[in-house]
Image: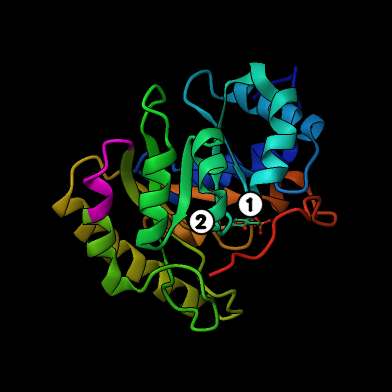
Amino acid sequence: MSDAQPHPALDAILERMSAAAGDRPRAHLLAVSKTQSAEAIARVAEALRARQADGPLAFGENYVQETLAKQPALGGLGIEWHLIGHLQSNKAREAAAAFDWVQTVDRLKLVEALARHRAPEQAPLNVLIQVNIDDETSKHGCRPEEVDALAAAIVNQPQLALRGLMAIPAPDPDMDRRRTAFRRMRVLFDALAARHSGIDTLSMGMSEDYALAIAEGATMVRIGSALFGARGPKTASTDVPETP
Ligand SMILES: *Cc1c(COP(=O)(O)O)cnc(C)c1O
């Protein structure tokens, strides 16, 4: 691949993604950069650019404040920013301004807040509906039967562009159960795509299970530790719990 920007971890991931896709187009890689420094992000962005001449350099962050702190140092690289952490409604204004995508839309209140705060001069904010596909212990993500109503609300908002679905299946050591969760997401995704235009993104699969997710139809995988190495401690402690 590129001699100028050696990055064996990235090469291994891209190869495995291609193999998992078989004849289908390779899924998109979202580099999950939470807790990583701006320097580490720039290194991966440059290595990625050397391997894909066009297409966005997509990076995922979990915390609004942490992202705002890093963005000024990364302005010239053409990074597309995805919010993949739970979003409190009181952070919707900052998120709507700072991100290109929000992958964690899971309730009507958030749809309305993001639409209200996305500036008309900005391109519409790309959104994914986060589905709580199998994890009863998680409070985040809507139930599968709520997808339709949320989708209808999103497509009514000109400041938002509905692109698809996102899930974080429970980290079950049994890969067959994870496969079942990915399959159920694929069924929901196909149903959504049949009802709405512009649906092209099924975001599922992380460092441990991205090949499985791609085999089951993921179009975007979110990879952190396999790309950057193990994470240090969380750097942003400024996000406060949402007050109801
Ligand atoms: C941290 C995170 C990832 C990446 O996890 P890894 O196991 O490090 O690849 C993906 N998606 C979400 C929502 C995350 O919070």
Q: Secondary structure at mark 1?
A: loop
6 w.r.t. 31: above or below: above
Say which residue label 2 marks: 89
Nearer-the-camera pick, 175 or 71: 71
Image location (x, y in percent) of residue 129: 38, 57
Task: Answer yes or no: disc 2 within 8 Å of ligand 1.
Answer: no
On residue 201, the disc is none
Q: Residue at x 27, y 45 (%)?
A: 199
Q: Determine whether, in the image, residue 123 is placed left or right of residue 51.
A: left
Q: Quadrant of residue 123?
A: top left
Q: CA distance from mark 2 to mark 1?
A: 14 Å
Say which residue label 1 marks: 62
Give the mark nearest the N terminus, 2 or 1: 1
Q: Is residue 236 located in the magenta-colored stretch of the structure?
A: no
Question: Looking at the figure, which quarter contains the N terminus?
Answer: top right
Q: Which residues are magenta?
A: 153-159
Q: Is residue 157 located in the magenta-colored stretch of the structure?
A: yes
How many residues crowd around disc 1 within 10 Å: few (fewer than 14), some, or many (20 or more)?
A: many
Q: Label 1 sits on what residue type?
A: Asn
How many residues crowd around disc 2 within 10 Å: few (fewer than 14), some, or many (20 or more)?
A: some
